[in-house]
Structure formats: structure tokens, C-alpha cells
Image: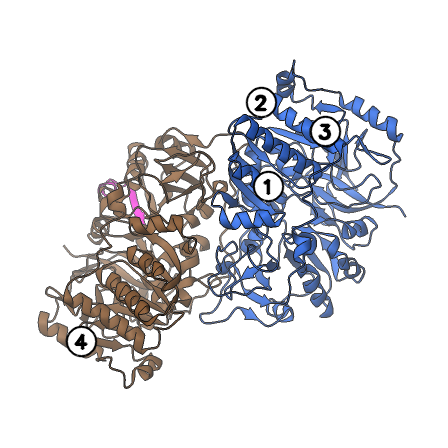
Chain colours: A blue, B brown
């Protein structure tokens, strides 16, 4: 297999399972070709009803068969009930060799592993959090899988890299024409932006809802002219799992000190100011950072232009303190964020094309001031891994990591030096998710390492009270606690391609040697 | 020139100025091909500003040159200041042979006639109301012009029949990234849906605004990922002309009696009921119909599911009486409708893809109960003309006429029998805008003629107090007042193609013999 070394020092095959790969060359080195793929016209004969009685009917009406690609969205997160439901119906019909193109899968989707073993699911292009990714690491998927960021997925669909035959859109509320949103109903999930691009590009679009309401269902986040069929089911998910689990602010002192360091860094780099902009996230440290930042804005009487998220109660609170003018909501993480999205005209629902697509005329991620991100591993070259654990298992998707880090004026990786016996800061990451070129600062409890390429930031921090530390020193401190980490043993087979947001090849994940 | 007779008895050339024409065969006889045209990727380099200092800069940056196609929208109606501004700058640069693809032009755009004479503008594909259309009738345009409906225009752009090089979007409020809407500012126009399809399909998109506000400008009706450049100008139009002129309810008894007849017809055909839906319009009779309908809904304690429009104070009033659940706003005709659009979550902004595109998975126009339309002429076969006057001059666009008439359960042409010495009901219309197959009822002050093809309506009206009258009798009554009309004299040259909403050729307009 002919390989070349890409710009993050990874060997990339030039051809892989029938695909020509473009090795990653830099953050903005693979701009778009001139034109997008051709979308499909749809046509519903005058007077025809879109309502179908069952998922089975939808499978038949859309002509779903062996070898096709189906897509799903992940606004319902670990509470999603639609992926398993639809895939089981597909399996029951004896259909094989299906590629799934979800925006993300979660532990709840573990039943897919059995369908992989049975040859029903033979590839996944999308985030695989938990058991499905783990199974891929162990070689249980027949064909290559592909990981893409939020923006990379939109780009890939628009470019025709992902060709979706049938998009199934889980909708907390919908009407008989297919207008739907995520805002109301027993399984409300708030924002419903992820499947927007699927509705524009899939050959066939099926809305699956447990809350069919009178026409017109507004706001029309997914719009009826882009929906072929509507199926009413008993339940699309489990509400408690949709709106919980990722929104607990860190309480342990170590994480709080990391969050405080991140806010201090924003202050001393001049990012913290009237009119600043910020991307909030879920996860304990990110939430704590959001909270501390909000308190500081209030204390200083400053107002952010917008906070983008991953919206939680904490972001909503900042708005009602008068400390941000607008909220952008690409994903709603709790009941408070859903409620506010429904009531507050300054709380704006966005989709990942708007927020993260690298191949459009300017996405939100490209103009943000600061973003707080996490990592499973970071290496001394500032490459970041969020996909695999240090034991080599693929357990996480990319999310917006790869979109927000390059775009923001200050991307911060907020991490402890080590977790249990595993160093987070290390010589070399198991896999590269976000390239060193996009990583500005590593914020730990023991100090902050600035990417030496960011001489502008280093200059700003001269004479500041920020405790700067060399990344190698952080690594040494980590290793002192954990010892030199053991490398996982991989076989030769490549099971997953990690794409950079622009479609170039950043890294590959190999099957674990058993 | 080889011609064939189409389904409304018009001779259609099979080839015209390099185009292959498909003769109109019936309302739903030309469904879409499988795929749409390829949209363009756009790309704004990280950190680049979209703001340009002038229209001239926009012309240069977009590479606008001889032979290209530029587009505009008509939400500013006869108060638009952007078409003339941009076209004069194009002319001043010595650029020639430009095709304009506006959603509509108005009398204010008369300066284009001079640019036609000068060879700057050589074709228009879009509605030409007033002097521009008149000039086309007199042969002053070098190349063929094309008329399309609201939905037909979206269809044509998606299909690649219209290839827009540069779309100029007049925006009452916008931010530096190009997010914009029509809701605020000194030239607020309300809804801003017409240019949505241009933003998706044009090679380059320029937002022109006289109200540049802080990012983010919300709601983002046109969205920044689809905008290349933003230009701030002193003024995009004249507000008084934008929001006035078409919203005076008829007061003369003849028009009021027509409006009352239209409402009576809705009642006795069973269209008037709890949960009914209705498309409102501008123009005296349509407004009077809306008002009478609203009063009757209130009197009977009934509630419509939605009213779609052309929104005016009268529609808003019906909502606040509790007599319609929602308002769809494709175009705002007065200050009251703009104000309510900004404040009322049940007042929904839509675009012409949603409302009228015949080649999508079900547009709003296809599911409405009743629509009230006008006409310049109607013939005894139930063909309707709204484009040309009986003297042969092209003076009006198609608007939503051709979209709403086929789709609605009851399409009503509300007309007086004659205007001055000109019979409206006549033997044969000068041109066909809306085919007989889509025309259900001709509602006049002297009685109502039902299309004999609508046997279902005729059955429902048996024994009702509705005064039915044969269309030939209406024609005879008209001719008795006016005498047999004189036919205009045409030359051979075809100056305008009238497309049916699905792209098939409904009729052609010939140059007037001087």
C-alpha cells in the first residue's frame, strides 16, 4: 500500500478501499472544487398523502435495498430510539450491506454491533461513541468507516462524498406534510439542525415522529418540500436520556482550577472584552468555564456579542444576566435550553452548515473568539486526539472539535495531565483528530502551554501572571505520575479513516491486535 | 419555424432562440427530471472581510462581465432602488449583453428601457410590470424574454434553466457576514423569501443594504454561508412606495358584489368551514374578499387553519379576532403586516420554494382550499390572461397566479365583465397565463361561471342560491356593453415566452406591429 506522510506526520495511503485519499496539508490547503453535487428533485403528486402506516412501509416506499446508505441525526443523543428501530426493521426485511451515515451514534446504539456481525451494517460514516466504535476497533465491521466533524459531514454531503439514499429524521413534533422541529412533545430535543443537509441531499427523506400535530407545524426547521414521507411511531426516544448526562458543572478542585485557568487565559490574551464571542460546550470543565466566564462578564459589566453552543442552563443564565446579546443553539443539552429556545427571540437555532462547514462562504466557527475543548490525548507537537483512547479503542466522534479549533482566535484544550495511570499529555497521540496547526493553548491545572507557532499570543502574555509552561515539561510531569505509557498493539488493517473537516486525510485507525 | 399546438390551443415553436421548448400538455404532465443543477461552493478565506466599499467593487470582485446573468428580488416592489443602482453601475463600466433574472420588475424600473436600447440589458427572465414589459412588446429588447410564476422561477433556477452569475440582494437589514432579513430599518419590507433560491444557486451573492447592524443580524432569512460580499449604500429604496399602493379595500359596489359572490361561493361549495385554508392577495377585490371572509368566520365562530398571502392589515386583523390559527407571509404589503411578522410567532415567513415550487415534495399552493385571483382577460374556454392587455402590450408578470390556481381546491377569478370599452370575458384571450385546467370559477358581479370540467363543484352547487351562469352568456353580456373587441396587430417576432410553472411552454407573446 503506497503511503505518504501528511502534515501531522501520519502515513496516509493514497488509495483505500476504492477511495482516493488526499493527505492533510494544513488547515486551509484543500479548498472546495467549484460545484456541489446535484441535489435530487422530489415530487409528490398533487393530492397524494405523505403519511405512511409504518417504518416497514417507509422502507418499501423509498425502495431501500442492499448496498444503500441511510442517515440519521443525533439530537436525541443517548435517548435516541429511531436508529435501532429503523435498522431492526431493515434487518428483519433481510436487507444487507447497509452503510449508515449518522451525525453521531451513542452507547444506546449498541444493538448495531449485532447487525454488523450479521452483515446488515457494513460501514458507518459518522461519529461512533462507545460500543459501536469499540467493535469497529476490534474489526467487526466489514468495510472502512469514516469519522468526520460536524462541518466536515455537511461538506461531505454537499460534495457528494456521502451519498445518502434514505434519510430518517427523528422529529419530536411534525405535521402530515413533514414540517418538523425539535421543540415540543414528550421527546423534545430543542435544536434540530443536524439533519437539515440530509433533507436537502438525500434521495428520499422520511420524518419519523411520536407527536403528529396539525399542519402547519412551526417553526419549520425541516421543511415539507424536502420530505417524502411521514411515519408516526409510539416513541422516538427516552426524554430523560436526551436532556441529561452532560450538563453537570465540574465540582472537583482540579477541574475547577483548569476552568479558572482557561478564563484567566482569555482575560490576559485580550479575548475577554466587551463584544467577545465564545463557544460553550458540555462536559464538566467546559461547563465550569462557561459559568466562571459568565460570572466575570457580570462582575465587570461586560456583554458578549454571542455565545454559541451546546446550550445549557448556564448559557441561558448568562443571557438573562444581560451578559450576552445572543445565543446560538446548534444543540440543546437540557430542558432549560429547549424552553428558552422556544421563548427567546435572541436565542437562535442554527445548523452545522451555518456553524461549521469549512467549504461555505464563512461559517460561525471561523469567526469565534474562544473555544474550550477537551481531549483524550495531546502530544508535544500540539496534535490532539479525541477519537481513540490510549489503548487504541475508537470510542468517540469528532463533534465540532476540528471545526472550532482552527477557526477560533483562541482554541483551548482543557485537560488534566493524566487520568488514572494514563498520561493525557504525551510524546505522540494514538490518533490525530485536530491538527497541531489548530491548537493554540493546552490548559492544565499545572499551567498553560502555548503553541510556539502562536507568537502573537506569546507576545500578549509577556509579563502577565499566566503561568506558562513548556509542553514537554507538562509531558514529563505527566509521565512522572504515570510512567511511560504502553503503546497499544495494532494489526495492519485500517478500520477507520479520520478526515479533516475539508475532506483531506488526517489519520487512520487500525484494528487492534487481539 | 416548426410549431405544435399545445393543450391550451396555442402554437408553440419547438425551438426558439436556441432553446428546446416543451409544449404545455396539462397541469401535471411535466414532472421533474431526477436531479437539480449543481449549486456552487463558495469559499471565503479565514479572516477575509466580506465588506466592500461600493457597488463598483462588487461588480469587479464578482467578475461580472459581458454576457452574464444578474438577479434581483422584488420585495421592495415599486419602492426598489437597487435594480436601477446596480444596473447603472454595470452600464457605466461598459458591460454589455446582460440578462436580468428578477423575481419581478415594476414601473420604477423604467430606466432599464434605456439600457435595453443601449444593449446593456439584452434579455430579462422574470416578471416585467409596466414600462419594461411595454418596451419588450414594442421590440426594444434584443433577445427573448421569459415570464415565470413565483414557483416556476424557483423551479427554473433549481433545474438550471436560469443560471445566475451574480445575485444582488437588497436587504433592509444585514450584518457584515451577509446575514439579512427584511424586517427592520428605514426600508423594511417584511418577508425576504424571494432571493432565497438565488442565494443557494447563484455563482456569487452580493447583499446590498442601507442598514448594516452588528453581527449577528437575526432572523437569518438569507444566511451568511451563502453570501460572498456585503455593500453598504445610502438607500435601497423608498419606504412609502414599498408598503403602500396595493392595500386599499375596494369600495365601489360592483367590486364589493364580486367579493361577496366569491365568499358565497366558498360557503356553498363547502370550502368555508372550520379548519379552512385561504390564499389572500392584494388588489381591491381580493382585499374585500379577505375582509368579508374574516367577518363571516367571526360571525360563525369558525377558525381557519391558515391564511397565506400577500399579507395585509386585513389578514392580521383576522388572526387577532381568533379566526385563523396561523398566517403564512410570502410577501408583506403594509406596515401592519411587517410589524406583526416581527412580533407574532404564529405569523410565519415563507419563501416561494415552500409556497409555490411545482417540482418539490409538495408546496403550500398545492394544498390550499381557496384562492382569489384577478385577470386582464378570461376566455370562454376558461383560459386566463394576466400578462398582456387586450391591446397586446405586455404589462404584468405572472406572480403566484399560475401556482395557486392549479393547486387550490377552488380557484376563483374575480373580475368585472368589462373595463371601459374592453370585455374581460371574451372569445379568446390574447395570451394564456393560467390554463383552463386550473381555473375553477369565474366570479363576476353578474353571476358565477363554473368550469364544466369541475362536475364535483357543479354537483355541490345544485339547489344552492348561487347564481350560476354559462361563460358564453357572460361573454355575450360583456360584448353587449363593449361591442366585439378589436384584435391587436402582431408581427412575427416572438418577444416573450410564457412558461407554465413546470417549465413547459404555455404561450408566446409577439411583437406589436407599429
Neighbourhood count class around disc 4 (C-alpha, 10 Å): few under 14, some 14–19, many 20 upward: many
Identify the residue position indicated by label 3 in the image.
Answer: A257
Image coordinates of residue B169 in percent, x first then y, are 38, 42
- Badge 1 sits on which subunit? A
**Does the CB distance between marks 1 and 2 fall below 8 Å?**
no
Q: Which residues are magenta?
A: B114-125
Same subunit: marks 2 and 3: yes
Q: CA distance from mark 3 to mark 4?
A: 86 Å
- Badge 2 marks a residue whose secondary structure is loop
Q: Chain of mark 4?
A: B
Relative to B283, residue B423 above or below: below
Cα distance, mark 2 to mark 4? 78 Å
Measured in 3D between alpha carbons, the distance from the residue under mark 3 to the one under mark 1, in whole angstroms, is 22 Å
- Residue at mark 2: A270
Tell me the distance, in whole angstroms, between the alpha carbons under discs 4 and 1. Answer: 64 Å
- Chain of the residue that carries numbered disc 2 in the rendered image: A
What percent of the width, then of the height, locates residue B37?
Answer: 49, 52
> Which of the two labelled residues, at mark 1 and mark 2, occupies the earlier sequence position?
2
The reply to whether the C-beta atoms of the residues labelled 2 and 3 are less than 8 Å apart is no
Q: Are marks 1 and 2 on the same chain?
A: yes
Question: Is the residue under label 4 in contact with that under label 2 (CB below 8 Å)?
Answer: no
Q: Which mark is residue A309?
A: 1
- Disc 3 or disc 4, which is closer to the eye? 3
Q: Nearer the viewer, mark 3 or mark 1?
A: 3
Disc 4 target residue:
B474
Front-most of A354 and B88? Answer: A354
Provide the secondary structure element on which disc 4 rests.
Answer: helix
Number of other residues with Cα within 10 Å of mark 1, as a class: few under 14, some 14 to 19, many 20 or more: many
State whether residue B182 appears in this view. yes
Left or right, A287 with respect to A346, comes to: right
Near mark 3 (Cα within 10 A), the count class, few <14, some 14-19 or many ≥20, is many
Callout 1: helix, strand or loop? strand
Amino acid at each position: 500500500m503506497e503511503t505518504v506522510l501528511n502534515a501531522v506526520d501520519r502515513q496516509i495511503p493514497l488509495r483505500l478501499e476504492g477511495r482516493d485519499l488526499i493527505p492533510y496539508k494544513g488547515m486551509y490547503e484543500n479548498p472546495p472544487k467549484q460545484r456541489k453535487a446535484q441535489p435530487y428533485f422530489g415530487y409528490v403528486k398533487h393530492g397524494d398523502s405523505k403519511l405512511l402506516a409504518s417504518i416497514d412501509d417507509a422502507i418499501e416506499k423509498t425502495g431501500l435495498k442492499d448496498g444503500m446508505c441511510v442517515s440519521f441525526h443525533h439530537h436525541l443523543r443517548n435517548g435516541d430510539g429511531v436508529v435501532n428501530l429503523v435498522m431492526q426493521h431493515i434487518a428483519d426485511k433481510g436487507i444487507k450491506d447497509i452503510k449508515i451515515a449518522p451525525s453521531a451514534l451513542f452507547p444506546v446504539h449498541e444493538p448495531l454491533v449485532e447487525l454488523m456481525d450479521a452483515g446488515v451494517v457494513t460501514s458507518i460514516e459518522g461519529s461512533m461513541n462507545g460500543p459501536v466504535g469499540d467493535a469497529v476497533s476490534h474489526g467487526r465491521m466489514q468495510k472502512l468507516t469514516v469519522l468526520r466533524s460536524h462541518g466536515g459531514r455537511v461538506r461531505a454531503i454537499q460534495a457528494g462524498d456521502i451519498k445518502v439514499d434514505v434519510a430518517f429524521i427523528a422529529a419530536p413534533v411534525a405535521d402530515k406534510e413533514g414540517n418538523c422541529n425539535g421543540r415540543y412533545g414528550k421527546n423534545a430535543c430543542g435544536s434540530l439542525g443536524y439533519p437539515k443537509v440530509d433533507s436537502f441531499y438525500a434521495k428520499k427523506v422520511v420524518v419519523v415522529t411520536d407527536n403528529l400535530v396539525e399542519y402547519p407545524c412551526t417553526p419549520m426547521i425541516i421543511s415539507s418540500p424536502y420530505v417524502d414521507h411521514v411515519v408516526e411511531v409510539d416513541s422516538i426516544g427516552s426524554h430523560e436520556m436526551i436532556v441529561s448526562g452532560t450538563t453537570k458543572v465540574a465540582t472537583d478542585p482540579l477541574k475547577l482550577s483548569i476552568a479558572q485557568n482557561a478564563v484567566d487565559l482569555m482575560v490576559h490574551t485580550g479575548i475577554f472584552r466587551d463584544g467577545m464571542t465564545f463557544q460553550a460546550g458540555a462536559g464538566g470543565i467546559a461547563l465550569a468555564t462557561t459559568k466562571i466566564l459568565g460570572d466575570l462578564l457580570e462582575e465587570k459589566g461586560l456583554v458578549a456579542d454571542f455565545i454559541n453552543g451546546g446550550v445549557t442552563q448556564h448559557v441561558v443564565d448568562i443571557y438573562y444576566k444581560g451578559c450576552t446579546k445572543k445565543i446560538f443553539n446548534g444543540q440543546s443539552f437540557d430542558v432549560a435550553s429547549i424552553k428558552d429556545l422556544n421563548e427567546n427571540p435572541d436565542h437562535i437555532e442554527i445548523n452545522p452548515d451555518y456553524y461549521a462547514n469549512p467549504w461555505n462562504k464563512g461559517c460561525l466557527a471561523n469567526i469565534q473568539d474562544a473555544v474550550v475543548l477537551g481531549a483524550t490525548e495531546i502530544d508535544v507537537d500540539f496534535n490532539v486526539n479525541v477519537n481513540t483512547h490510549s489503548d487504541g479503542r475508537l470510542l468517540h466522534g469528532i463533534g465540532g472539535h476540528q471545526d472550532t479549533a482552527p477557526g477560533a482566535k483562541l482554541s483551548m484544550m482543557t485537560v488534566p495531565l493524566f487520568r488514572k495511570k494514563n498520561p493525557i499529555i504525551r510524546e505522540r497521540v494514538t490518533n490525530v483528530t485536530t491538527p497541531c496547526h489548530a491548537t493554540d493553548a493546552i490548559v492544565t491545572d499545572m499551567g498553560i502551554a502555548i503553541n510556539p507557532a502562536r507568537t502573537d499570543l506569546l507576545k500578549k502574555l509577556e509579563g502577565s501572571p499566566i503561568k506558562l509552561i513548556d509542553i514537554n515539561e507538562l509531558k514529563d510531569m505527566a509521565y512522572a505520575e504515570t510512567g511511560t505509557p504502553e503503546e497499544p498493539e495494532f494489526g495492519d488493517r485500517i478500520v477507520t479513516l479520520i478526515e479533516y473537516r475539508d475532506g483531506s486525510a488526517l489519520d487512520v485507525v487500525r484494528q487492534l491486535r487481539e
